[in-house]
Image: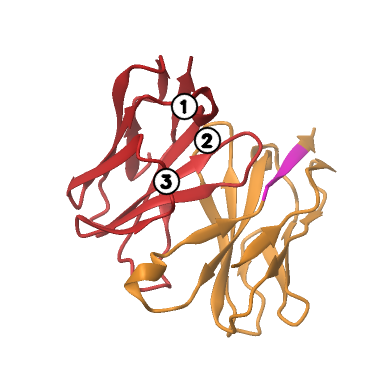
Chain colours: A orange, B red
């Protein structure tokens, strides 16, 4: 079974600065997807960025970028130019690329990292 | 505005009550999901439906009973719950189940407190 670990329960960053959230995962599969979701106080899980394991290039989405190290099974998220609206829980998630119905698009989540942004 | 809406947002129920959580997606998706988010555990997948057919039941106790009358609506019927079932229940949807590249969209969740 796959597992996802986020070792930082909480991270604090000054507004306009950069923060990096770590995520490691364990899998025996070679093809999969990795995601970072943001959960603000409204509790809705919002997709921030996704990475396909077969792609070597790190995904980037505006101020959000990832450092995907497949051999190390590491998937960190960098938030640049942090804004007050970035304050939230951030969850790393894994999903198999198996194309079978029973896989059910199952997302396996890490425990989350709370990001605090100081003005 | 979210494409996945959940009601009620907050629910308090006694252990002998019967209640239901409702989820509706406005995205034209074929797959819907229930996830549980408790304070001390990572999010856990509970159920997956594809075109109204349940394709996964992730070892969930029978006191949770899902229902998917059509591809836009998903219910979670609750009966004789325990206090440890208190959690945030998140509904989600995606275009299809068997296409693993689909993005999964979440609702805002229903806070359940069992007293």
- Residue at image mark 3: B60
Q: Residues within 10 Å of mark 1 (few under 14, many from 20)?
A: many
- Span shown in magenta: A111-116
**Labels 1 and 3 within one chain:** yes
The image quarter in which residue A26 lies: bottom right
Q: Position of residue A19 (x, y in %)?
A: 80, 52
User: From what the image shows, is residue B56 above or below residue B42?
Assistant: below
- Residue at image mark 2: A43
Q: Nearer the viewer, mark 2 or mark 3?
A: 3
Q: Position of residue B43 (x, y in %)?
A: 55, 47
* Quadrant in the picture for the C terminus of chain A: top right
Which residue appears at 68% of the width and 38% of the height? A87
Residues at marks 2 and 3 touching, judged by CB atoms closer than 8 Å: no
Q: Nearer the viewer, mark 1 or mark 3?
A: 3
**Labels 2 and 3 within one chain:** no
**Labels 1 and 2 within one chain:** no
The label shown at residue B111 is 1
Residues at marks 1 and 2 touching, judged by CB atoms closer than 8 Å: yes
Q: Secondary structure at mark 3?
A: loop
Q: Secondary structure at mark 1?
A: strand
Which residue appears at 65% of the width and 42% of the height? A89
């Amino acid at each position: 079974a796959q597992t996802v670990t986020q070792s930082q329960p909480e991270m604090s960053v000054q507004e306009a600065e950069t923060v990096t959230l770590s995520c490691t995962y364990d899998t025996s599969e070679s093809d999969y997807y990795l995601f970072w979701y943001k959960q603000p106080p409204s509790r809705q899980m919002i997709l921030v960025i996704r990475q396909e394991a077969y792609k070597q290039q790190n995904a980037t989405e505006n101020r959000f970028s990832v450092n995907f190290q497949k051999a190390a099974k590491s998937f960190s998220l960098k938030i640049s130019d942090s804004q007050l609206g970035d304050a939230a829980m951030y969850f790393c998630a894994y999903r198999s690329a198996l194309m079978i119905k029973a896989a059910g698009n199952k997302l396996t989540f890490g425990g989350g990292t709370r990001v605090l942004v100081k003005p | 505005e979210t494409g996945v809406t959940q009601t009620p947002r907050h629910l308090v129920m006694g252990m002998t009550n019967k209640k239901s959580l409702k989820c509706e997606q406005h995205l034209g998706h074929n797959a819907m999901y229930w996830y549980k988010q408790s304070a001390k555990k990572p999010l856990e997948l509970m159920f997956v439906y594809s075109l109204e057919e349940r394709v996964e039941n992730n070892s969930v106790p029978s006191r949770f009973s899902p229902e998917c009358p059509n591809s836009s609506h998903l219910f979670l019927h609750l009966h004789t719950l325990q206090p440890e079932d208190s959690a945030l229940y998140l509904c989600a949807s995606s275009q299809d189940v068997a296409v693993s590249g689909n993005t999964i969209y979440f609702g805002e969740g229903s806070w359940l407190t069992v007293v």
